[in-house]
Image (spheres, rainbow, N blue to C red):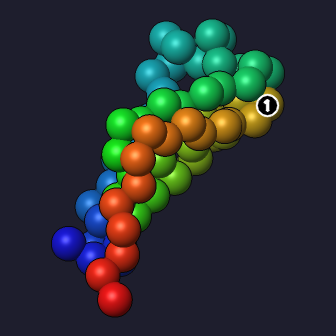
Amino acid sequence: MSGIARRTIVENVMRVTPKHHGKIEGRPVLIIDDVMTTGATLDACAQACLSAGASRVDVAVLARVARER
């Protein structure tokens, strides 16, 4: 799947539930992922955390998929 297709699929899908806004608001968030393909899911998660009031979002990734050349 292309990066554009992945971004379209996850766009506006990730949200922090109102129940958890208080746990995130004003705090830094660390998102950990095993494999990053295009970064679309990580971006959607980071945007959801920032929308919930996170002070910043950092990402740690174990491996990244190599692009085809």
Query: Residue 29 at what x, y percent from top left?
Result: 65, 26
> Could you tell me if residue 12 is visible in this image?
no
Q: Classify 63 as above or below 4.
A: above
Q: Which residue occupies 36% across, 75% down?
A: 67
Q: Which residue is mark 1?
A: 55
Secondary structure type for disc 1: loop
Looking at the rendered structure, the number of numbered marks drawn on it comes to 1
Task: State the image quarter where residue 46 is shown.
Answer: top right
Query: Residue 53 at what x, y percent from top left?
Result: 71, 30
Query: Residue 18 at what x, y percent from top left?
Result: 51, 19
Q: Which residue occupies 20% across, 72% down?
A: 1
Q: Quadrant of the C terminus?
A: bottom left
Q: Which residue occupies 75% across, 35% down?
A: 56
Q: Classify 36 as above or below 56.
A: below
Q: Which residue is farthest bottom?
A: 69
1 or 69, nearer to the observer: 69
Left or right: 16 as drawn, with respect to 23: left
Left or right: 5 as drawn, with respect to 7: left
> Could you tell me if residue 6 is visible in this image?
yes
Query: Residue 23 at what x, y percent from top left?
Result: 63, 10
44 or 53, nearer to the observer: 44
Q: Which residue occupies 61% across, 27% down?
A: 30
Count neighbours of disc 1 (C-alpha within 10 A) and say few if under 14, some if 14 to 19, many if 20 or more: some
Q: Which residue is farthest left?
A: 1
Q: Classify 19 as above or below 68.
A: above
| Amino acid marked by disc 1 | Ser
